[in-house]
Image: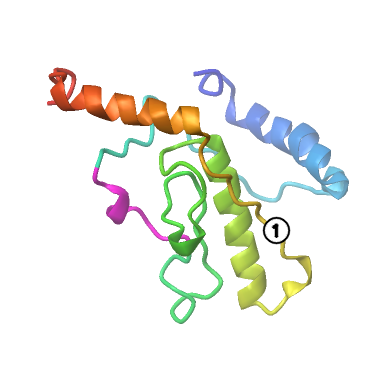
Amino acid sequence: GGVMSISDEDIIKILTEDLLPSAVPKFKDAKVVDSWVGKYAGTVSWFSPGSYTSRPPLEGAGNDVLPNVKIAGDWVRMGDREHGAKGLCQERAYVSGMEAANSLLKTTGDITDVKEVLQVREDEEQFKFGVSVNNQVMKVLPRFWVK
C-alpha cells in the first residue's frame, strides 16, 4: 500500500534520482523522455496448487521463435534450471532473473559475462524428517481450509 499514495511524478523522481543511480552510477545523467506508472490496488499474483504447468517458461516462446525474449520472476517455470522451492519467493525471483540474463547473453553470443548460479544444497535430515511427519499428519487431518 505504501506506493499507492505516492504520486506518479514522485515515483519517477525516486526511480531516476535515487534507485537507478545507486545501482548504476551513470544513470544519474539520464533524462526522462517519456514515462508511465501503472498502479493496481489489491492485485497480487495468486497461483493455486496444480497451476505450475500453466506458468510461462523462462525461455518465453522459445529460442527458435523469439530468441531475445526471456521471462523472469518467482512464478516462471525454469525447466532444467529449477532452483530451490517451486513456490513464490524472492530467491526464486532473483535466480530466475540471473538465469534469464544468462540465457539472453548466450542467445546473443555474448557468453563472456554469464554468471554462475549456485545450486541449492540437499535438504538436511531434520528438515526431511519434518516434511515426512507433516505429510503423514496431513493424510489424516481434515483440510477444512481448502475448498
Q: Nearer the viewer, residue 135 or 60?
A: 135
Which quadrant would residue 130 be assigned to in this image?
top left
Total residue callouts: 1
Asked whether residue 51 is drawn in magenta, I would say yes
Q: Secondary structure at mark 1?
A: loop
Is residue 6 shown left or right of residue 84? right
Q: Is residue 65 visible?
A: yes
Residue range in magenta is: 50-58
Residue 51 vertical position relative to residue 1 in the rendered view, above or below:
below
* Residue drawn at point x = 55 percent, y = 52 percent: 96
| Figure quadrant of the C terminus | top left
Is residue 12 shown left or right of residue 147? right
Residue 69 vertical position relative to residue 14 in the rendered view, above or below:
below
Asked whether residue 73 is drawn in magenta, I would say no
* Residue drawn at point x = 53 percent, y = 34 percent: 124
Residue 3: % across, % down: 55, 23
In the rendered image, which residue does mark 1 sit on?
Answer: 116
Q: Amino acid at mark 1?
A: Glu
Q: Nearer the viewer, residue 122 or 102?
A: 122
Q: Nearer the viewer, residue 3 or 73?
A: 73
Residue 104 vertical position relative to residue 43 in the rendered view, above or below:
below
Q: Nearer the viewer, residue 98 or 6?
A: 98
